Amino acid sequence: MGWLAGYVMASIAASIVVVRVFDYFVGEATGIAKEATRTGVFVSVWTAITTAAGMRDFTTKVRSLRRLGNGMGKKLEGLITMGRRR
């Protein structure tokens, strides 16, 4: 879970920047609708960045485990066929 902390901080920072840009373009609007929209934009950006980063790391881990599994399978196959030759 330590890897997630960096992504959460980065996604919060990116979300704040996106909300500031949103405020710049929608600066004239006021009221509850603007606050609700700001919250939605923040949560959406934060979730998208954190999820994308987490899935990238998960995919990397799965690929490395798959490579490890393939290597072990070949070693086991080698041991089995070596036993048949005797």
Image (cartoon, rainbow, N blue to C red):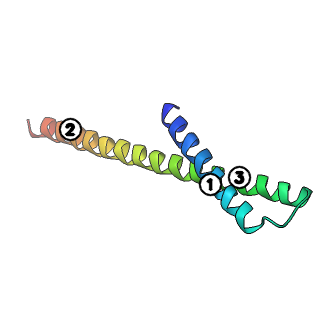
Disc nearer the start of the sequence (1/3) = 1
Instruction: Identify the secondary structure beneath mark 2.
Output: helix
Give the crowd class for mark 3: few <14, some 14-19, many >=20 residues within 10 Å: many
Q: Which of marks 2 and 3 is nearer the N terminus?
A: 3
- Furthest-right residue in this view: 31
Q: How far apart are marks 1 and 3 (CA)?
A: 9 Å
Whether label 1 touches label 3, CB < 8 Å: no
- Indicate which disc, 1 or 2, sits on the residue closer to the N terminus: 1
Q: In this view, does 85 lie above or below 27?
A: above
Displayed quadrant of residue 28: bottom right
Residue depicted at x 53% and y 32%: 1
Badge number at residue 42: 3
Numbered circle sitting on residue 48? none
Amino acid carrying mark 3 in the image: Phe
Which is closer to the viewer, label 1 or label 2? 1
User: Which residue in the protein does label 1 denote?
Assistant: 17
Circles 2 and 3, Cβ within 8 Å, touching? The answer is no
- Amino acid type indicated by mark 1: Val
Foreground tag (1 vs 3): 1
The C terminus sits in image quarter = top left
**Which residue is denoted by mark 2 in the rendering?**
80
Real-space Cα distance between discs 2 and 3? 56 Å
Q: Quadrant of residue 61?
A: top left
User: Considering only vertical position in the picture, is 3 above or below 45?
Assistant: above
Determine crowd level at label 2: few under 14, some 14-19, many 20+ residues with C-alpha closer than 10 A. few
* 75 relative position to 54: left or right: left
Please tell me which residue is depicted at 53% across the width and 43% down the height of the picture: 7
Provide residue 80's location: percent of width, then percent of height: 20, 38
Towards the viewer: 20 or 66? 20
Secondary structure of residue under mark 1: helix
Q: How many marks?
A: 3
